[in-house]
Amino acid sequence: MTRVDFYLLAEEAKTSRIEFACQLAETIWRRGHKLYIHVANEQQALALDKKLWRFKPEAFVPHGLLNAHPPSPVEIGWQDDPGNHHDVLLNLDLKIPSHFSRFQRVAEIIDGNEAVKTPKRADWKFYKERGYPVTAHDMRGR
């Protein structure tokens, strides 16, 4: 069964949701996982692609857009079909993608922005009501 992890950022976080996503992507990749990052649209995918290249000068996260050739261990997409990915989904969209349950793990990031908190609270409830194991990681003190 898919395991769901919510990462709770501080209201006044110095690190934005996207910056934290880059750090989390690096951690997930370094631990040997294949990662699919789901965003709302192509514009967000291109912006995240650009951010991953520059988020930390000493870091390298091999990534690309979904269906690019050759494929990368970390891929970014907005499509309804995440290709061959089944390991870890990092969901940056404000809604749960229909394909979430094919993944071993799902990561969700919540910051202090009400436009993010409100739909993510509903997502938490959705996962819990359906019996998915949900864990909160409080990043507010870090």
Image (tube, grey):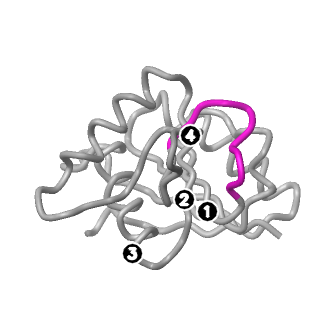
Which residue in the structure is indicated by mark 3?
A: 30
Q: Determine the CA span between mark 4 and mark 3.
A: 20 Å
Q: Are marks 1 and 4 in contact (CB under 8 Å)?
A: no
Q: Please, what secondary structure does the residue beneath circle 4 have?
A: loop
Contact check, label 2 and label 3, Cβ < 8 Å: no
Residue topped by disc 2: 35
So how many labels did they put on this image? 4
Dot 4 or dot 3: first in sequence order is 3
Tell us which disc is closer to us: 2 or 4. 4
Q: Residues within 10 Å of mark 3 (few under 14, many from 20)?
A: few
Label annotation for residue 66: 4
State yes or no: residue 82 in magenta.
yes
The region drawn magenta spans 76-85
In the picture, measured across the screen, residue 25 lies left or right of residue 80, that is left
Residues under labels 1 and 4: Cα distance? 14 Å
Q: Under tag 3, what secondary structure?
A: helix
